[in-house]
Each structure stands twice: as C-alpha cells, then as structure tokens.
Image (spheres, helix red, strand yellow):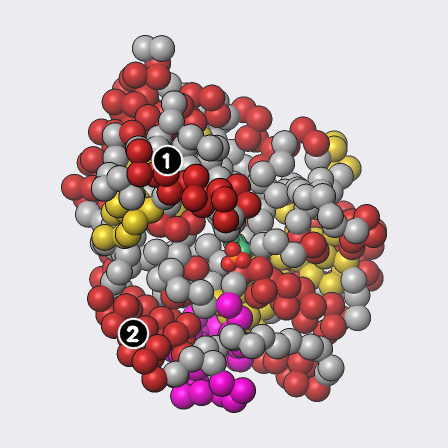
Amino acid sequence: MGLQGQASKEWFQRASAALVNGVSSQFRYWGDDDTLVIEKGEGGYLVDVDGRRYLDLQCGFGPIILGHGDPAVSGAVAEAAGEASSFAMTQRREVEAAEKVMAALRWPSRMRFTNTGTEATMHAIRLARGMTGRDVIIKFEGQYHGMHDYVLFSTAGGPAGHMGSRFRPVPWQSSSGIPEAIRSYIRTLPYNDLDMVERTFKSEGGSIAAVIVEPMLGNAFGIMPADGYLAGLRRLCDEYGALLIFDEVKTGFRLGLGGAVAHFGVTPDIGTYAKAMGNGFPVAAIAMSDAVAEGWRRSGIAQAGTYSGNAVAAAAATATIDRLADGEAFRQIEATGTRMMEGLAKTLADRGIAGHVVGQPAMFSVFLAEEAPKEFRDVVNHDAETYDAVAMKMITKGVMPCPDALEPWFVCAAQTTDDAELAVEAFADSLDEVLAG
Ligand code: PMP
C-alpha cells in the first residue's frame, strides 16, 4: 500500500544508507514502503516528516505513559542534563529516583538501575541462578523478555506451529546466532497452564533457578492471567526453591503505580521494570525482595553498567513517578482505554464479527476469533489477515496502532475520550472497507 509520503520516502532512503534496514530496532521495520520516519511527538500524537499527524496507540511500544514531550519530565531531564550525566560514583539524582521507584512499587527491599529491559532481565536471571546454584529457567510461549540469548526462545514473533506438541513443547529459537547449548537451559511452557509448570517442577525441580513471567501477556495480545495462575506460580516456586521473576517491563507503571504486583496481588522475588517508568527515556530497574538483596550482598554475582543510574535517566524516572503519583494520569488512561475497548467490542458485535477485546484499558488488543485467547498458541485462530489490513487502513486515516495485533494498543494520559471516539471510528470505517473488499 505504501504509507510513506514523499519526505518519509526520502528520509527512509537516507536511513537505509546508514542504519541496517533503516532502523535501530528490528520491530520498527514495516517494509521499505511502509516504514515511516517521525519528526516529533505532541502529547498523544505523532507527527511524521511529511507533517502527517497520527493518534499514537503504540506509545513507543509502551513507555509513553504521560504523553510525548510531557513538560514536567522534559523539564527535569533538561535541567539534569545541564548539570550532570554519568559519574564513576553514585549520584544524588539516582538516590532520589530509587527512593521514588521503591515507594511507588512498595514491595521491593532493594533495587538497581539498568538502562533497558533487556539488561534488567539478563541481570535478574543471573541473580536467580547465582542465588539458587541452578541453571534452568522456565519461560512462557509468546512472552518476550528482551534480546539476550537466554530468553530468545518461543517469543511471539515465531509461528505457534513450530513450538512442538503442547504437552512436550519445543523451545523455538527466535534468532540465528544463539549457541545451541543455550537451549538446554530453557523450558518454554504454555501460559496459563499451571499443571504444565507443576509437571516440569516435579520432573526437574532441582535444576530450575527461576520462573520468569510477564504477569499479563504484554507481547501477545495482552492475554490476562487466569484466576489463581500467578498465585499458583508463586506457590510452586516456593515449594521447589526457585525464584519467581515478574517481568514488568510493560506492565510496570502502566497498570497503575504498583504495576502488576499491586494489580494482581502476587509478589515476586525479583521484578524488572523499564518503559513507563521514564516516559520514553531509557531507564530500567531490577527490584528484589530482602532475601534476594541479602543474598546478592553476600555473593559474588556480577552486575554493572556505565550508564546505569545516570542523571538523565534518574531525572526522567523521578519526574514521571511524581506526575503519576496522584493517580490522575491513571484515571485518564482508564477512561480513554475503557471507551476504546467498549467501542471496539461494539463495532465487532454490531457487524456480527467474532472477536474479543483482550487486556486492560492501558494496554489491550483486538483478537479476531470465536474464543478469547488464553495462551499464545491460540493465535492460530486469530484472523490476522483482516486485522492487519484494518490496522494499515487506520494508519492512513491518522490513527496508529501497531499493524501487528500481537502488540497491544497502548494508551497514554495525554489522550482523551474524544481520541477514543476517533480511534473507534477509524477502526469501524477501516473494518467496513476491508470487509467490502
Ligand atoms: N521485557 C518485556 C516484557 C518487554 O516487553 C520488553 C520490550 N518490549 C523487554 C523486556 C525488553 O526491553 P528493552 O527493549 O528495553 O530491552
């Protein structure tokens, strides 16, 4: 179809001459004719280099929680950048930010900053292995925990059909370049199936260091945990002496100030946070229980990062959390997201189309099938062809969800219920056009 205007076309050619495929992250490449080049953000909107405006329902893959260019966050970042950057020592802004993070999350005893979600999950896994003296990690199909070798198996980018029998899942390697031996350290299980986790613990519990889980499946439609599922994981980890890691890179500071821990009422041993914690600036964290912090202090488990806790990242986190603290931003997101979810569901129902709007008002997806999904393997039932065509049409109408339904729609506090109406209208019109052929 070709989403690019003339300026995007020219900038993308320049991008491709400098960056591999014209992007710095593979998920941003939509093809040579459809990859847009962005000029700036304005609250809940994006403007591309052709001056076209889009309601931004990607929110940068989740980090934009307040809106683009939030004045309080940008102001704090500019002030910090003028005075400080990285030092070979702990700095005041880093301490203040850590206190804010801990007070917001409530459950951790200690934390450390990293720069990205990938670093946070990598360190969390090393910490779990170092604490338990075990090597194997359980992860769930369709979940994404970043780009390091230990977790790049059976992510949502892969075909569900390549993951083996549901009862004997095969870890599907999501990239070339991962040493074959790494596969032996991972067990990939269907999400929302506690029996499978229990069976795995029963047969090899002595080798399992940790279960790492996105508390809701933020990288595959926003599938929600079944009642008792997270509590069941907690119980099994306790029973078999493994650590429970919540990867809250998407849910943290998005499902509310306390993230998934507060939302679902289950507390992990280690939590990883990034994205919404800094409203788009690169800041992440590993948070942990007292027992893990104590074990880490006494052990030789390595963690470091030149830029970890830098002034800009710390200022972004402090200012973002300050802006989120009174709950107003979350109330706004709840109102906007709920209006969208209801409007989308009604649009499907009015047309007699089988489908479900899955997730939470802050992050949700449209799943086109009779049954709502419970795990990643259900994606084979989703009518991706129709959905993807609808999403591309929406973008031409100035409303931009991710064109791939696996990636949820994200809502930020700068968006309003009027924006929700706009999104629903664009969805309905696009759907009608696609159905009309
Ligand atoms: N964990 C989860 C749940 C994520 O969604 C992501 C990124 N989408 C990551 C980890 C990796 O974070 P980053 O891109 O900051 O490395």
Q: CA distance from mark 2 to mark 1?
A: 32 Å
Query: What residue does disc 1 label?
Result: 9
Q: Tell me if residue 65 comes above or below residue 180 in the rendering.
A: below
Left or right, 300 with respect to 402, comes to right
Choose mark 2 or mark 1, whichever is in front. 1
User: Nearest the camera: 126 or 56?
Assistant: 56
Provide the secondary structure element on which disc 2 rests. Answer: helix
Q: Earlier in the sequence, mark 2 or mark 1?
A: 1
Q: Position of residue 357 (x, y in %)?
A: 38, 34
Q: Give, as a single range, the part of the protein colored magenta.
A: 87-115
From the image, which quarter does the N terminus lie in? top left
Number of callouts: 2
Q: Amino acid at mark 1?
A: Lys
Left or right, 23 with respect to 211, comes to left
Circle 2 packing at 10 Å, graded few (<14), some (14-19), many (20+), is some
From the image, which quarter does the C terminus lie in? top left
Q: Amino acid at mark 2?
A: Ala
User: Nearest the camera: 112 or 333?
Assistant: 112
Provide the secondary structure element on which disc 1 rests. Answer: helix
Quadrant of the image occupied by residue 297: bottom right
Q: Tell me if residue 428 comes above or below residue 88 in the rendering.
A: above
Q: Position of residue 5 (x, y in %)?
A: 30, 33
Q: Tell me if residue 16 comes above or below residue 348 in the rendering.
A: below
Q: Residue at x 58, y 75 (%)?
A: 305
Circle 1 packing at 10 Å, graded few (<14), some (14-19), many (20+), is many
Q: Which mark is residue 193?
A: none
**In the displayed image of the protein, which residue is found farthest to the top?**
436
Q: Tell me if residue 305 comes above or below residue 436 in the rendering.
A: below
Quadrant of the image occupied by residue 395: top left
Left or right, 48 with respect to 60, comes to left
Query: What residue does disc 2 label?
Result: 78
